[in-house]
Amino acid sequence: EPYPVLTSSAASDVYRDSHKARKRFGQNFLHDPLVIQRIVQAINPLRGQRLLEIGPGQGAITLPLLRACRHLEVVELDRDLIQPLADKAATAGELVIHQQDALRFDFRSLADGERLRTVGNLPYNISTPLLFHLLEQADAIQDMHFMLQKEVVDRMAAAPGGGDYGRLSVMIQYHCRVEPLFRVGPGAFKPAPRVDSALVRLTPWPQPPFPVKDTGLLTTLVRQAFSQRRKTLRNALKGLLSEQGIRATGTDPAARPETIGVEQYVALANQLETET
Ligand code: SAM
């Protein structure tokens, strides 16, 4: 395996709360102090930085982050968690709580000249749409540290050629450097999820290595390509790009979508742009 597993050790009940975890909000609360410490170390929060946490829950990472930064913004949807969180944070620093849906949250409005450092042990049921929502605002983000389903992290980091490689890989890698940091077993969370998890660091490129002229066209093209991943590019891209157009970018029209790298997808999207 390419990145290490962090085994859950002295799992404790530091966050013994009366709150009953809600499945519909994807609530799996971290309770392993070693894992929490490693996440905070990976983030390396510094005073003066603009940090934003998505889904603070009962505050497992919120409180150590707040102690380090003294100021933290959080977006939490579950209203029942807001007051207990505010109470816990009272002596740790200045916590600004936005009781909102992160899927609709305007991250850009908080950046205000300085880019955001975004972190979160994300609700797994909305992680993919949330990642796409964040990518649309990547210019306002300095970096992101997310705990996700391990399988999602593997898909984000995948290289062309394998079964993990797909729409998520191309779109994330177009916008960001992807660093899987460590894996975490189910025992670090309460309730324990059925899947393994992993922490990933995403750093938006100051300039994408292969700039596309119109990111909307890249999105359209990549979505169409991978909706038919067993087909050849020629067939999968029918109606968007002709065989000739594909060939003009130096790509083999008989290749399969999962064998094409980010640079080639950018070339295809730029070709589409000249044709439309
Ligand atoms: N950060 C806490 C931890 O590590 O223990 C909680 C993590 S839990 C996996 C996900 C959190 O995201 C929950 O607190 C849940 O209520 C919140 N959440 C779920 N859907 C959300 C949404 N659409 N917008 C904002 N927060 C959401």
Image (cartoon, helix red, strand yellow):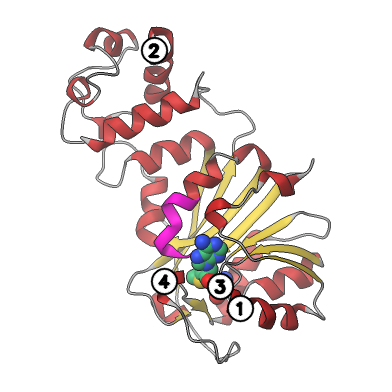
| Residue density around tag 4, few if under 14, some if 14–19, many if 20 or more, within 10 Å | few
Dot 4 or dot 1: first in sequence order is 4
- Residue 173 location, x and y as percent? 47, 38
Q: CA distance from mark 3 to mark 2?
A: 45 Å
Q: Which mark is residue 81?
A: 1
- Pointers 1 and 2 in contact (C-beta within 8 Å): no
Residue drawn 53% across and 41% down?
Answer: 135
- Helix, strand or loop at mark 4: helix
The vertical placement of 58 against 25, above or below, is below
In the image, the segment drawn in magenta is 123-130
- Pointers 4 and 1 in contact (C-beta within 8 Å): no
- Helix, strand or loop at mark 3: loop
The residue at label 3 has a CB less than 8 Å from ligand 1? yes
Dot 3 or dot 2: first in sequence order is 3
**Quadrant location of the C terminus in the rendered image:** top left
Q: CA distance from mark 4 to mark 2?
A: 42 Å
- Judging by the rendered image, the residue that carries numbered circle 4 is 24
The residue at label 4 has a CB less than 8 Å from ligand 1? no
- Judging by the rendered image, the residue that carries numbered circle 3 is 78
- Residue 261 location, x and y as percent? 36, 29
- Judging by the rendered image, the residue that carries numbered circle 2 is 271
Q: Is residue 112 magenta?
A: no
Q: CA distance from mark 4 to mark 1?
A: 14 Å
- Residue 123 location, x and y as percent? 47, 65
Specify the principal SS of the magenta part: helix
Q: Amino acid at mark 3?
A: Asp
- Helix, strand or loop at mark 1: helix
Dot 4 or dot 2: first in sequence order is 4
Residue 135 vs residue 82, the one in the foreground: 82
Q: Amino acid at mark 4?
A: Arg
Q: Amino acid at mark 2?
A: Gln
Dot 3 or dot 4: first in sequence order is 4
